[in-house]
């Protein structure tokens, strides 16, 4: 069980100003301890370190829940966590406290390893940022996200984290890129377009939608680097993603109807949006009632993955879930746009979304209430 108090010992006045991913290391550790549930954090610092703390760091800690106190004299033996000020600490290490800390007399000290070490130089800061980046990559998304998208977004996120920009601003910016993609798709069927200009508009629309998918991770990555993850941010990201997707599907459906015409195209479009609405309704119903997160990913991690794997429908949904991930279908959209036939994606998307909506509805009705009664 995580202790309710912690002591952070200064290492030297030369290292207290070191930063990792935009945060002073001691600031980062205070926020991590507070976020994990530690109620009192005592600081044992030299006079120079105290001065730096009050002038540069204290103002960034105004909204944390823990009480911060300056410790004078020796460290009390009261069952506290005792860590150096510039240790690389991560959230999962506090969540699995007994694996990463050991008792020394009456207090608890970290078990140092390759991912929990004291940061003494800028080289160590770079090493720490790489460890944090690798952890995000390892625990986020599928093959395309890990091998392509994250390799682009992570370096951008590391730069932006140093500016202390709020992740929500990045979410809004990415939504504007997504909206621009829909506009270009609509411009591809504007009257008077030459064949070349129509193709270029369609290509740009597909490219921007793919760019929005790649950059979609930036806000979440910055939030994780700077410890600003919140349910409001998760909901804003969800709204942004789905607004972008909805408008892109509307614009592409309009292009589909313009090229194909007839009752069959109208029915296909109706099936598409019915399936999308059904799928999102099931996920959002879970998030609003049972989750502390506003991210669509939470539905999979917190619910689907914990259901009985011997249920064929659950097993099928877990195997097929990757098809509905933005990282995959945005790439498909771009590839179809490259051919100049982006509207051909509509019938395929209609089949996938209506199937997903029906499957999730059955799973929710079968397991949702029962699952949370057992928690």
Image (cartoon, grey):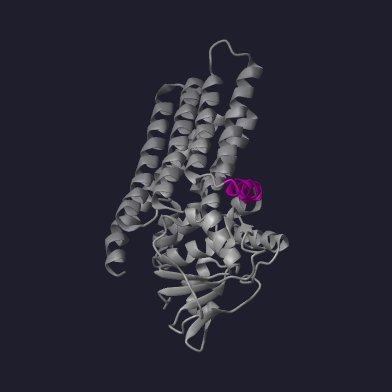
Residue 36 location, x and y as percent?
44, 67
Q: Nearer the viewer, residue 10 or 358?
A: 10
Q: Nearer the viewer, residue 77 or 171?
A: 77
Residue 10 location, x and y as percent?
58, 70
Q: Is residue 155 magenta?
A: yes
Residue found 51% across the figure and 28% down from its top:
182
Q: Is residue 220 magenta?
A: no
Q: Residue furthest bottom?
A: 105
Query: Dividing the image into 4 quarters, which one contains the C terminus?
Result: bottom left
Q: Left or right? Give the position of 148 relative to 371.
A: right
Query: Dividing the image into 4 quarters, which one contains the N terminus?
Result: bottom left
Residue found 60% across the figure and 60% down from its top:
132
Residue 14 location, x and y as percent?
67, 64
Region rendered in magenta: 149-163
Residue 358 location, x and y as percent?
36, 48
Q: Is residue 38 visible?
A: no
**In the rendered image of this protein, does residue 75 appear above or below residue 51?**
below
Q: Nearer the viewer, residue 56 or 121?
A: 56
Q: Residue furthest top?
A: 192
Q: Left or right? Give the position of 218 relative to 282.
A: right
């Amino acid at each position: 069980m995580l202790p309710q108090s912690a002591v952070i010992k200064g290492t030297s006045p030369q290292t207290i100003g070191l930063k990792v991913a935009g945060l002073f290391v001691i600031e980062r550790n205070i926020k991590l301890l507070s976020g994990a549930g530690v109620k009192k954090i005592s600081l044992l610092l030299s006079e120079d370190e105290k001065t730096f703390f009050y002038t540069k760091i204290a103002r960034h800690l105004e909204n944390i829940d823990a009480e911060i106190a300056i410790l004078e004299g020796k460290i009390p033996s009261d069952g506290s966590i005792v860590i150096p000020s510039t240790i690389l600490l991560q959230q999962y290490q506090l969540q699995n406290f007994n694996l990463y800390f050991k008792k020394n007399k009456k207090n608890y000290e970290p078990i140092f390893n390759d991912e929990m070490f004291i940061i003494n130089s800028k080289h160590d800061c770079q090493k720490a940022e790489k460890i944090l980046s690798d952890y995000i990559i390892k625990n986020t998304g599928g093959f395309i996200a890990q091998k392509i998208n994250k390799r682009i977004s992570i370096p951008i996120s590391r730069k932006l984290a140093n500016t202390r920009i709020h992740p929500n601003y990045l979410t809004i910016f990415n939504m504007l890129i997504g909206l621009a993609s829909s506009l270009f798709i609509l411009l591809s069927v504007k009257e008077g377009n030459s064949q070349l200009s129509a193709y270029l508009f369609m290509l740009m629309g597909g490219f921007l939608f793919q760019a929005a998918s790649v950059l979609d991770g930036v806000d979440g990555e910055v939030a994780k680097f700077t410890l600003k993850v919140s349910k409001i941010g998760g909901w804003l990201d969800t709204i942004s993603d789905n607004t972008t997707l909805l408008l892109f599907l509307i614009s592409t459906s309009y292009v589909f109807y313009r090229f194909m015409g007839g009752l069959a195209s109208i029915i296909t479009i109706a099936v598409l949006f019915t399936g999308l609405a059904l799928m999102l309704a099931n996920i959002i119903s879970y998030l609003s009632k049972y989750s502390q997160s506003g991210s669509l990913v939470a539905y999979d991690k917190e619910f689907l993955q914990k259901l009985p794997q011997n249920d064929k429908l659950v097993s099928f949904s877990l195997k097929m879930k990757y098809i509905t991930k933005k990282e995959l279908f945005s790439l498909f959209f771009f590839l179809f746009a490259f051919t100049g036939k982006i509207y051909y994606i509509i019938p395929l998307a209609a089949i996938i979304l209506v199937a997903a909506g029906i499957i999730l509805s059955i799973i929710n009705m079968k397991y949702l209430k029962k699952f949370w009664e057992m928690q």
